[in-house]
Amino acid sequence: MTYNAPAVRSHFPSLDTGLAHFDGPGGTQTPRQVGAAIALTLTRPLSNRGTRSLPERNADDAVTGFRAAMGDLLNADPAGIIYGRSATAITYDFSHHLSHGWGPGDEIVVTRLDHDSNIRPWVQAAERAGATVRWVDFDPATGELTADAVAAVVTENTQFVAVTGASNLIGTRPPISEIARVVHGVGALLWVDGVHSTAHANVDLEALGADFFVCSPYKFLGPHCGVLAASPELLETIHPGKLLPSSDAVPERFEFGTLPYEMMAGVTAAVDFLAALVPADLGVAETLTRRELLVRSALGREEHESQLLARLESGLADLASVTVHSRAADRTPTLLLTFAGASAADASQFLFERRILAPAGSFYAIEASRHLGLGDDGGLRIGLAPYNTAGDVDRLLVAIEDFLAS
């Protein structure tokens, strides 16, 4: 597939600064179409949702458009799409909702590969309920977390398993569909943190087998918020506390207060932008559904990012003082580096002074960083995004060489 990175970059005003962005795992840059959609929604006639007046219909269209767009992106039922302030906020909310039925003798499973937002809410909820927490380890030598490792931990007492769709620290993509079969085999529910994975691959909720899937649009060119996808039938069985006059319908029962219509419109615009990245040589865009366009777009972006990753890894392989901790066979274009005789923080500062943004730290994946033997300091994280180019990669490699020489 043909992928035109310069054409993609032309939609991002922030890239005009000349900064080279390798900080996408912490949040991508935003195309002007997303900003325009947010501004339009805020400045045109707007009120609370309804069907009578234009302001009411504009608000309602923002909500239904958001649910439809995220349903297409995740291959999920729009009626099971929930808006939240952030993935962390959604996870904490559902840790309270889901733990109501937990008690002594029940087991809750988390992994050491995960971001802390997919660990601590569940650990804390289990502690409140008197349930037992069990841990799944990953192999620090390879970065792999396998379905067999999950199978070795779950039992007939397991009620719930939380696992990442991809590590935000080292990029590892666990085999979620295999893990889902293990989890469902003992009658438990599976919660997948897709915050990092959604930015780098086609997501198919049905194929994954996840009961709950959470992601963050600001990791894939959208505004800062969180999204949860689940089947409406499953959501109907969960009853959060609510205000007396608030809707008890699914998914509205999980969305507290007046929704930020402008943010929802921004998410829809981000999904539409991704769908429009279908390579021009296909010549069939007008005949495809948005879901089909998104699948093809994901393939094109993956191919582009894989080529850049290969170029980056080839250059790093020649640098004896660099250790790459991202080693799993299936992973996102995300590398964690450490340096012999130098700190990752110093490397990040050196790059920053050359207008290259690659942050250092453990990035809230504190358990993973410690399991890798890196303590709380982590390493230098390099993340590729759809707007990165071969020139960015070459510029980064030269700067790392200069840092090592200094």
Image (spheres, helix red, strand yellow):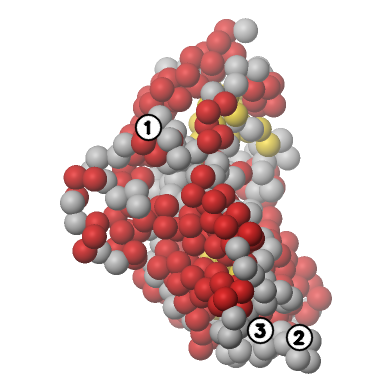
Distance (Cα) linking label 1 and label 2: 48 Å
Distance (Cα) linking label 3 and label 1: 43 Å
Dot 3 alpha-carbon crowd within 10 angstroms: few under 14, some 14 to 19, many 20 or more: many
Q: Are marks 1 and 2 in contact (CB under 8 Å)?
A: no
What residue is disc 3 on? 253
Residue 44 is left or right of residue 288, and the answer is: right
Q: Secondary structure at mark 2?
A: loop
Q: Which picture quadrant has residue 400?
A: top right
Looking at the figure, which quarter contains the N terminus? top left
In the image, 228 versus 325, the foreground residue is 228
Q: Which picture quadrant has residue 42?
A: bottom right
Disc marking residue 335? none
Most distant residue in the top direction? 406
- Work out whether 43 lies above or below 96: above
What residue is disc 2 on? 242
Q: Amino acid at mark 2?
A: Lys
Q: Are marks 3 and 2 in contact (CB under 8 Å)?
A: yes
Which residue is located at x 50 percent, y 22 percent?
396
Q: Secondary structure at mark 1?
A: helix
Looking at the figure, which quarter contains the C terminus? top right
What residue is disc 1 on? 6
Dot 2 alpha-carbon crowd within 10 angstroms: few under 14, some 14 to 19, many 20 or more: some
